[in-house]
Image (tube, grey):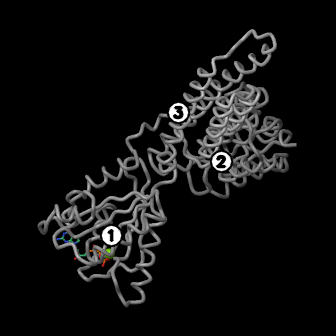
Amino acid sequence: MFFEDTIAAISTPLGIGAVSMVRISGKNSVEIADKIFSGRVKPSVAESHSILFGFLIDPKNSEEIDSVLLSVMRSPRSYTGFDSIEITCHGGVVNTKRVLDLVLSQGARLAEPGEFTKLAYLNGKIDLSQVEAIADIIHAKTEGARKASMSQFIGSLRNEVLNLRNQLIQLCSLLEIDLDFAEENLLIIDTTKINDQLSAVEKQIKKLLSTYNTGHIIREGARVSILGKPNVGKSSLMNALLQKNRAIVSHLPGTTRDYIEETIDVSGIPFTFVDTAGIRDTKDDIEIHGIHFSKENILSSDLIIVMFDISSPYDADDRRVKAVIDDAMLQNKTVKTIYVGNKTDLGEFDRFKFASHIGSDFIRVSAKSQSGIDELKTKIGVLFNSDVSFNSPMISRLRHKIALEKSLSSLEIAKRSLADNLSYEFVALDIHNAIHALAEIVGEVSSDDVLNNIFSSFCIGK
Ligand SMILES: Nc1nc2c(ncn2[C@@H]2O[C@H](COP(=O)(O)OP(=O)(O)OP(=O)(O)O)[C@@H](O)[C@H]2O)c(=O)[nH]1
Ligand SMILES: [Mg+2]
């Protein structure tokens, strides 16, 4: 049985380092520690949350394995809720593995990825939104992602979901009380009031749903492709954004043939910038391939920077670029665009004519002299709401979005049932469905598939 096992794993990255940590959790943890640890105090008589200094000794041959610090955390005051031991030993691959082997030889089983956290979840120490937050803290690529994950870990999403759920539970109980007393005609509920309260909860759910775009981009990052005709300065802009010479720049049109990508942090969000081959009519086979990639990139991007050379007239190639982008936007409806007029250092041809050709305002930059680059970065950040408070409740996973949408559609059905004067029994049932969907977010109801999917993304030892 799951709860019967005592599990162990190396919780620090395997490699050369000052120290490593081997974690043990489960009912035999302290007993195992007693068998292998020699110090002034035995783990089994040590108080919870004390740290002991001593040696690990292999009971088989009394070999001294390592000098360590050993922490004792007794149930239920531990990460998993079970008795837990953490051994801080010297680092290094061979030494750390030897310590783990010693623990395993005394009856612990090697933990599966995320199993310590799974124990914590099954033991009711944390809910599923916090489990996900832990994975996100570990994988955070930017300060923004770290902050948002920490806010979720300390309960911002959980509290919001529980608050929504409580409002619905109260509504349900009102309806159910009314049903109980219906025959005696004792209570008559104001249907309009119930409808208004349902609408109020719907509004709050919609607000939470609206955080998905920013939330998942903070977690997963955004893809930004730079497009334009050859020679407008796409590769120069790429280098200016990255602050390094990553892409080849030359005066020859058609320099970039493949696409190049690199990720940087802009306002707390990981942005992957993609420099693409200039779009034009060409007979060159390799270039045609590159242009095909450029068009494909539009479909997988969250944002396209469309670039023009403002120092020369808007021409047929620019028109072609604009047509390609307009066409791709019909297929990728969520993609955002920013228009950029480059080479302002060479003078501007006709700013207003340009704006009317592209049907949009644009940002003026000089990739060469780096002017306007900060303004462009700010604009990119604003497009993805990077000014959002990382501490407010936010959803970041498709799983959350689907659950909220399910909840919303059950509430819509409830309102319809109410409008159709159906028995409150049906209305209450619809609201129960909405509550059930909300409960999925915090994992009060969950399928094995969902759990396996979440825990498989963890490292062993967490
Ligand atoms: N004066 C000036 N020259 C620029 C600027 N940006 C780029 N250039 C020059 O324009 C030429 C083309 O620049 P690239 O960055 O290679 O242009 P590209 O759009 O990547 O071109 P392809 O890869 O061929 O599609 C180079 O000679 C650059 O030095 C700018 O802001 N001002
Ligand atoms: Mg280029």
Q: Which residue is denoted by mark 2 in the rendering?
A: 11
First in sequence: mark 2 or mark 3? 2
- Residue sitting at x 21%, y 59%: 364
Q: Which residue is denoted by mark 1 in the rendering?
A: 322
Q: Is 108 left, or right, of 133 in this rendering? A: right
Q: Is 6 left, or right, of 439 in this rendering? A: right
Q: Is 29 left, or right, of 53 in this rendering? A: right
Q: Which residue is denoted by mark 3 in the rendering?
A: 203
Q: Where in the figure is residue 5, as x and y percent of width and height?
A: 84, 42
Q: Amino acid at mark 2?
A: Ser
Q: Where in the figure is residue 16, as x and y percent of width and height?
A: 57, 56
Observer-side mark, 2 or 1, equals 1
Query: Residue 418 or 201: which is nearer the viewer?
Result: 418
Q: Amino acid at mark 1?
A: Lys
First in sequence: mark 1 or mark 3? 3
- Residue sitting at x 59%, y 22%: 192
Residue 5 visible in rendering: yes
First in sequence: mark 2 or mark 1? 2
Whether label 2 lies within 8 Å of ligand 2 gets the answer no
- Residue sitting at x 72%, y 47%: 451
